[in-house]
């Protein structure tokens, strides 16, 4: 009896969270329409990434890369420098694992079980793809004799791992917020927050001297393709697994 009494408040909190999530969830047709729009633009990244990879492989250092880095690093505002450092910070381990774990756990507590599994894939796939591609291209990072380097890192440069992680994981979270939640101020703020992280992390990696602009561009392109694969996985499994989940079940189960 004591055990049942102690579990009751936990169940009530869980049910309240799920009810709140249901109330904020958009209708199935609206979710499908938003998902379609989100994915159309990602296909254009395939050709662009292939061209850029060939260029990087044949020309390790671009004059334009150096010019862009020096132009950004000429900004001497302390607030800007602190912001660039702060934006990059969540992308380093162990904080990248901690943040992704906490977000995935939160999604599960809201009753979005299939979304939890898909978000876990989104947290793991981009780093794996990034390591594989870096090992194939083996492009050196920027050096202190060319630009300012905040900290030397022991890995290759192309493409940026930070950018790929932000695009793949935070991009998927952005997608969930965009497709699942009803229009509201909370939804808008979440969309702006995650979009800002994704947009600004590329600038921060260049500003800190740890990547070239072409590394960042390649990471945005490859990250978008990785995100597309995650979205395809998510949509494929949405109608097959956890179809009785309490929040945002497939349209056929409503």
Image (spheres, rainbow, N blue to C red):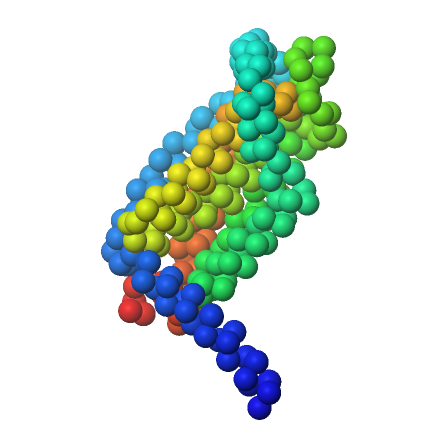
**Figure check: 220 above or below 6:** above
Comparing 175 with 151, the one in front is 151
Q: Residue at x 57, y 91 (%)?
A: 1
Taking the spot 52% from the left edge, 39% from the top edge, the residue there is 166
Point out residue 160 in the picture as x, y percentages from the top left corner: 59, 30
User: Above or below — where is 202 with respect to 65?
Assistant: below
Image coordinates for residue 113, horizontal then vertical, percent: 47, 64
**Going 51% across and 58% down the picture, which residue do you hit?**
106
Q: Position of residue 45 (x, y in %)?
A: 43, 31
Say which quarter of the image contains residue 85: top right
The quadrant holding residue 204 is top right
- Relative to 60, residue 32 above or below: below
Residue lying farthest to the bottom in this orientation = 1
Say left or right for 193 vs 204: left
In the rendered image, residue 227, in percent from the top left (x then y), is placed at: 47, 43
Q: Quadrant of the C terminus?
A: bottom left
Query: In the image, is 119 to the left or to the right of 208?
Result: left
Name the foreground residue: 156 vs 207: 207
Q: Please identify the quarter of the rendering in which residue 18 is found.
A: bottom left
Q: Is residue 152 visible?
A: yes
Q: Which residue occupies 54% across, 11% down?
A: 71
Residue 225 visible in the current orientation: no
């Amino acid at each position: 009896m004591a055990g049942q009494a102690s579990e009751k408040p936990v169940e009530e909190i869980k049910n309240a969270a799920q009810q709140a999530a249901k109330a904020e969830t958009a209708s199935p047709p609206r979710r499908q329409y938003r998902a379609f729009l989100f994915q159309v633009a990602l296909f254009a990244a395939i050709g662009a990434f292939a061209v850029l990879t060939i260029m990087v492989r044949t020309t390790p250092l671009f004059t334009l890369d150096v010019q862009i880095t020096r132009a950004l690093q000429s900004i001497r505002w302390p607030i800007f420098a602190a912001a660039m450092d702060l934006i990059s910070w969540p992308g380093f381990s162990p904080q990248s694992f901690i943040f992704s774990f906490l977000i995935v756990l939160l999604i599960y507590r809201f009753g979005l079980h299939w979304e939890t599994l898909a978000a876990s894939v989104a947290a793991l796939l981009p780093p794996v793809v990034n390591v594989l591609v870096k090992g194939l291209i083996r492009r050196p990072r920027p050096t202190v004799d060319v630009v300012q380097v905040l900290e030397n890192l022991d890995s290759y440069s192309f493409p940026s791992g930070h950018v790929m992680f932000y695009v793949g994981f935070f991009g998927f979270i952005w997608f969930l917020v965009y497709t699942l939640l009803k229009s509201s101020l909370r939804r808008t703020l979440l969309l702006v927050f995650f979009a800002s992280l994704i947009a600004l992390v590329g600038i921060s990696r260049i500003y800190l001297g740890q990547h070239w602009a072409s590394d960042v561009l390649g990471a945005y392109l490859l990250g978008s393709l990785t995100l597309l694969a995650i979205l395809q996985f998510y949509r494929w499994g949405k109608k097959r697994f956890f179809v009785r989940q309490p929040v945002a079940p497939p349209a056929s189960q409503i």
